Amino acid sequence: MKVKSVLLALLFGLTPLLWAQEPKAPATGGSQARAEHDQKMVEMHKQEMEAMKADIEKMKSSLAQMKTNVAAIKDSAEKARWQSNVDMWETVVNHMDRMQKHMEAMGPGMMHHPATGAPPPSPPAEKKPQ
């Protein structure tokens, strides 16, 4: 139960951080201020990506432990309940991993359009096999 709480807190804790990264407009000092702002954004992006990678690795480790624990459960109803839990967390961790890789590829300006400050267009939906 503690693992679920930690993983859920991580999931909900990371999501607002991604949306809250709105760049502040640089002072009207010209290219020097813009260059400093850009460098700050690059550094923030790098730190966030490192933190997200570390969180995902912790989640993967917890998920592996959960899988090990499920294998040891003898009661079939209890095992099925925990297996559903593991399946759900595996989906969440895989999604977080894909998001992190996408964000890393997009770079520090991915959350806002550089000229307008507007969010970028949504990526095309993935087609999932049925």
Image: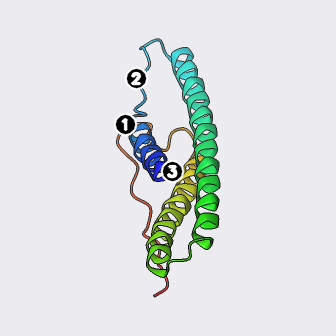
The local crowd at label 2, few if under 14, some if 14 to 19, many if 20 or more residues have their Cα within 10 Å, is few
Residues at marks 1 and 2 touching, judged by CB atoms closer than 8 Å: yes
Q: Quadrant of residue 102?
A: bottom right
Residue at position x 49%, y 16% in the image = 30
Tell me which label, 3 or 1, sits earlier in the chain: 3
Tell me which label, 1 or 2, sits earlier in the chain: 2
Q: Is residue 112 among what the camera can see? A: no
Residue 85, horizontal then vertical, whole percent? 46, 66
Q: Helix, strand or loop at disc 3?
A: helix
Residue at position x 38%, y 35% in the image = 20
* Quadrant holding the C terminus: bottom left
Q: Which residue is mark 3?
A: 3
Give whichever of 72, 31 is nearer the camera.
72
**Which mark is drawn over residue 76?**
none
Residue at position x 61%, y 32% in the image = 47
Disc 1 residue type? Answer: Gly
**Which mark is drawn over residue 117?**
1
Residue 57, horizontal then vertical, whole percent? 64, 49
